[in-house]
Amino acid sequence: MAETKYDVLGIGNAIFDVLVQTDEGFLARHGMTKGGMALIDEARAASIYQDMGPAVEMSGGSAANTIVGIASLGARTAFIGKVKDDQIGGLYSHDIKAANVAFATAPATGGPATGCSYILVTPDGERTMNTYLGAAQELMPGDIDPAEIAASAIVYLEGYLWDPKNAKDAFLKASGIAHEAGRQVALTLSDAFCVDRYRGEFVDLMRDGTIDLIFANEAELHSLYQTSDFDTALAQLRNDVKLGVVTRSEKGCVVATKDGITAVPAFPIKKLVDTTGAGDLFAAGFLFGLVRGAGHENCGRLGALAAAEVIQHIGARPQVSLKALAKQNGLPV
Amino acid sequence: MAETKYDVLGIGNAIFDVLVQTDEGFLARHGMTKGGMALIDEARAASIYQDMGPAVEMSGGSAANTIVGIASLGARTAFIGKVKDDQIGGLYSHDIKAANVAFATAPATGGPATGCSYILVTPDGERTMNTYLGAAQELMPGDIDPAEIAASAIVYLEGYLWDPKNAKDAFLKASGIAHEAGRQVALTLSDAFCVDRYRGEFVDLMRDGTIDLIFANEAELHSLYQTSDFDTALAQLRNDVKLGVVTRSEKGCVVATKDGITAVPAFPIKKLVDTTGAGDLFAAGFLFGLVRGAGHENCGRLGALAAAEVIQHIGARPQVSLKALAKQNGLPV
């Protein structure tokens, strides 16, 4: 197999986060489903934003957060995602490049503005996301550079890519190129409502070998197999995909293969501040472990550690060097 | 005297903050003077930003931060400052209105972009600011609404207004209207280098009664009177202005009038994270105390409390309700 240029290349919706701490009443007033990611149009974005308190802004996007986490752990990474050439797109491009992630996707020069997610963080630390996809909808198969994909040990995709109309084709193109080059393809199911929208397609992606590794949280797993029984769902997952990783919040995670199951506890935290990015950073730690050849238990521990860092502050990007943090905690980096 | 509509109206440069935690080496490499505010042009802004790590963005601006702090304590506030009608200007306008501050300054429709400050926070918590004024330079005397000024108990101005070419005239216009209406005018000296640029003018503003109340930190006070002796400088300040408030970081503050001096200790903190906004929020607490008729000691304690909140997290705007915080600490609100 040819040498790799990147350990992990991520493809996802490039979304700028607008975060605010608020009360439960805000969610009720705006008819939001707590803990979910709802797609919104420009008019609803304006209406939500107008009612939001003073915010903090930073770059986000699920797969992008994961890739930034992997870079922070010290691996070689790249990201493909679409912003517009507007001010917010400029901030977004800066942040991902500044995190040592290769980012070469040309920004859109027309059409909708750079995508934004209006994120409400309630006092219990839960986040409720309202995403205006904007320019992220302009990601096309032509944005997938075959040479970059073929040179990446793992291609990481987000389920959210099923929402913009052309990103799905970009996703399938990337998976095909990766497998032809003998690489691995990973997918996060992203969100239980997203799974609800595309359940059949996601199951097919696993069964037909388009993807090799699935990340899901419990709600997404239950939605995928339409069962409230964890063990039933897990058994189905083991049957459908080579490697399945299920996160269970404070109960840690379960790594499932056809050969067996490994449970890994969560990493202790002082205070839950904001769950935004918890799953993304878990995936970052886990994938980093995989590319370093760590066993599944250490992959899970790296995931738990990265998730614990990100949920103890506002925002979905790590605030410290995850490499240093992993070292301090005796994990392999 | 006519009824007031606002307790405090602030006029300042409307600046969006781009904050990053970095090491001392960054400051050295870019020839920055640690702890200062340097004015930069677009080219230098681009060069600094390109080298900066992933950032967090939020609204800032010295007087605006103070006004937001006063609003958070529960008083009636307004702000006058100039953004452009670009994406960042939109974020800025949202944030200040969402903080319950009246903000009616028309955004610039042409000319430079909304002003940004590139703020480097070193591991010791000190912040070093590099400010591209942008649209803030377009603040004109015409932006000062005489009725709003006359209806504000205190007009609060920042020394930084001496930098953009027309803001000075806006400043003097506002002071004149305020005094004609029997109101008070306060000024923060902003920055030791700013004092160095306009020393003579600032002293004249005090001596000719254009301003009634001065906020300064030690470095600014020493720069103002070109002496390294605190007591000498303080004696001159008492001679030049009706009310002078000097902040001394962890040593607390000194409130000086012709009648005497009141020293107030700093408020204890757990961990210094980022000094950005420390002086701004001190002024917020102090001015809030004044409008509520608190004595100078309680004014100083309110200032110390608000400053302590803001230096324990990244960014210059309060993250909690200062009113609730003051109540918890037995201070009058």
Image (cartoon, coloured by chain):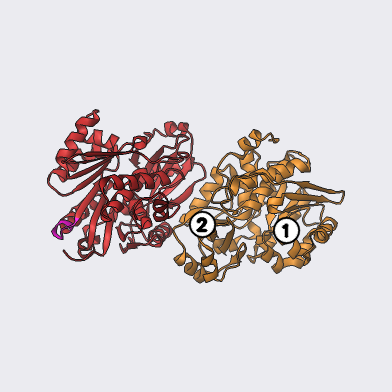
Chain colours: A orange, B red
Q: Quadrant of the N terminus of chain A?
A: top right
Numbered disc 2: secondary structure? strand
First reached walking from the N terminus: tag 1 or tag 2 = 2
Q: Position of residue B219 (x, y in %)?
A: 29, 34
How many numbered marks have been drawn onto this rendered protein structure?
Answer: 2
Secondary structure, mark 1, is: helix
Tag 2: Cα neighbours inside 10 Å, few (<14), some, or many (≥20)?
Answer: many
Query: Residue A200 in the image: x percent, y percent?
Result: 77, 67
Q: Is the residue B267 above or below the residue B331 in the image? A: above
Residue B181 appears left or right of A129: left
* Disc 2: host chain: A
Residue furthest to the front: B330
Measured from the top left, where is residue A289 in percent x and y? 72, 41
**Residue wearing tag 1:** A218
User: In the rendered structure, which amino acid carries the disc numbered 1?
Assistant: Glu
Q: Examine the rendering and report whether any part of residue A14 can be seen.
A: yes
Query: Which residue is nearer to you in this view: B42 or B229?
Result: B229
Q: Nearer the viewer, residue A236 or A79?
A: A236
Instruction: Measure how far apart labels 1 and 2 are at the Cα level.
Output: 25 Å
Q: Which part of the image, by quadrant, shows the C terminus of chain A?
A: top right
What residue is shown with label 2?
A19
Label 2 amino acid?
Answer: Leu
What residue sits 22% from the left and 29% below the top?
A: B227
Q: At x 52% / y 67%, what residue is drawn?
A: A25
Residue that protrudes farthest toward the right in the picture? A259
Quarter of the view holding residue B250:
top left
Task: Residue A132: tell me if it is visible.
Answer: no
Q: Nearer the viewer, mark 1 or mark 2?
A: 1
The boundaries of the magenta stretch are B178-183
The answer as to whether the residues below labels 1 and 2 share one chain is: yes
User: In the depicted view, which residue is nearer to us: B47 or A218?
Assistant: A218
